[in-house]
């Protein structure tokens, strides 16, 4: 398609299909795991270790104690970013806690972060923020209401008081190729997934992009998403078009389809089995497992995907280091937005007007 090697392998694959009498709707050509991995290494220009873990999400036990006036109720929020510097907060968890109680829960967060911002909102509507380190799989801190002026904790806690910032639930991005011999622009299907704000037993799944000509369908486990509609139809467009890739029609961000689905028991964003059904891949395209080709990746953030024909390594220069350095979690930051990353002319900018 977009890379010479991919073209050669894809043509050979189609010749095999034709030679064996296979059709798009019956038996399909399935490259071996070795061929799939070799294609990924050639396109990305890396050697993928058998120990390569594509997971960029970590988990921790959060214990947030709140002390205030008797009977007072506070809202505790834990963010995946710093809302004070970024201007917008992505909320990992939100829960009310009564004075004297401790919020305790398991938390998923971007593994590149060694500290998270926690806020408490009091009865006056003020928000108190502080940065809390994640250590040994735990996020622990105590907030003491500033109205308790004799509190011995007051001078120890470094408060930042602010009015409410713009917020939304934390987002995990699932990005897929549509064939096992992919070109790795990772824009054939892009999903943005969050917990529902008012009902955390529900997930919100937004379809953002359909950069493939094939008919593709999205699933979570055995459950079809978007009412079982093919992705182009779910976006309200004709099949075969490349949508929101820079090389085809654009669907306004406000019109992107949003599905509400039940959160499966034991659900985690890192291990969620979102996958796409493709007519040429009998087993579907799933999120990459350890040591496998990254035909599907989970990114713990509101990620900008590459334009059509743009390999991920061209848009995000740090992706190669991430793929090469198996044990170095500092390379997990490759997807973070900086002054130089991603290259603005290599990623899709959503249409909002």
Image: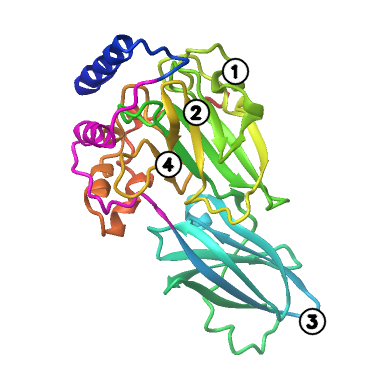
Q: Residue 179 in the image: x percent, y percent?
A: 37, 26
Q: Is residue 77 above or below residue 180?
A: below
Q: Residue 110 in the image: x percent, y percent?
A: 44, 56
47 drawn magenta = yes
Name the quadrant of the C terminus.
top right
The residue at the point 41 percent across, 60 percent down is 113
Q: CA distance from mark 1 to mark 4?
A: 23 Å
Q: Earlier in the sequence, mark 1 or mark 4?
A: 1
Q: Residue furthest front?
A: 20
With 72 as the anchor, is 86 left or right in this view?
Answer: left
Q: Nearer the viewer, mark 3 or mark 4?
A: 4
Q: Nearer the viewer, mark 3 or mark 2?
A: 2
73 drawn magenta = no
Q: Is residue 326 above or below residue 14?
A: below
Q: Give the residues drawn in magenta, as a range.
A: 28-57
Numbered disc 4: secondary structure: loop
The residue at the point 53 percent across, 55 percent down is 83
Q: Earlier in the sequence, mark 3 or mark 4?
A: 3
Q: Earlier in the sequence, mark 2 or mark 4?
A: 2
Q: Earlier in the sequence, mark 3 or mark 2?
A: 3
The residue labelled by disc 3 is: 70
> Which label sits on residue 98?
none
Q: Earlier in the sequence, mark 3 or mark 1?
A: 3
The residue labelled by disc 4 is: 287
The residue labelled by disc 1 is: 233
Q: Nearer the viewer, residue 241 or 219?
A: 219
């Amino acid at each position: 398609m977009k890379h010479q090697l991919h073209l050669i392998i894809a043509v050979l694959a189609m010749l095999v299909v034709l030679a064996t009498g296979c059709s798009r709707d019956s038996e399909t050509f399935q490259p071996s795991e070795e061929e799939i991995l070799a294609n990924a290494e050639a396109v990305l220009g890396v050697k993928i270790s058998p120990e390569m873990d594509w997971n960029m999400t970590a988990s921790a036990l959060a214990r947030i104690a709140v002390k205030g006036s008797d009977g007072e109720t506070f809202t505790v929020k834990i963010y995946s970013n710093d809302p004070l510097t970024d201007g917008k907060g992505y909320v990992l968890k939100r829960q009310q806690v009564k004075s004297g109680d401790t919020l305790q829960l398991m938390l998923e967060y971007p593994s590149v972060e060694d500290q998270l911002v926690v806020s408490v909102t009091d009865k006056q509507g003020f928000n108190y923020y502080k940065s809390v380190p994640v250590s040994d799989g735990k996020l622990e801190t105590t907030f003491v209401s500033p109205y308790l002026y004799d509190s011995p904790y007051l001078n120890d806690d470094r408060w930042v008081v602010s009015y409410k910032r713009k917020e939304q639930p934390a987002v995990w991005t699932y990005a897929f190729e549509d064939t096992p011999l992919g070109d790795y622009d990772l824009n054939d299907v892009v999903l943005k997934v969050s917990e529902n704000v008012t009902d955390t037993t529900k997930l919100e799944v937004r379809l953002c992009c359909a950069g493939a000509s094939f008919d593709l369908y999205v699933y979570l486990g055995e459950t079809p998403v978007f009412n079982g509609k093919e992705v182009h139809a779910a976006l309200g467009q004709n099949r075969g078009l490349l949508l929101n890739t820079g090389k085809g029609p654009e669907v306004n961000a406000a019109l992107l389809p949003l599905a509400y689905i039940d959160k499966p028991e034991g659900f985690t964003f890192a291990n969620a089995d979102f996958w796409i059904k493709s007519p040429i891949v009998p087993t579907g395209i799933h999120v990459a497992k350890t040591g496998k080709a990254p035909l599907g990746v989970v990114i713990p953030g509101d990620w900008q995907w590459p334009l059509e024909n743009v390999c991920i390594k061209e848009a995000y220069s740090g992706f190669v280091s991430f793929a090469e350095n198996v044990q170095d979690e500092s390379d997990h930051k490759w997807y973070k937005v900086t002054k130089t990353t991603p290259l603005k002319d290599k990623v899709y900018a959503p249409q909002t007007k």
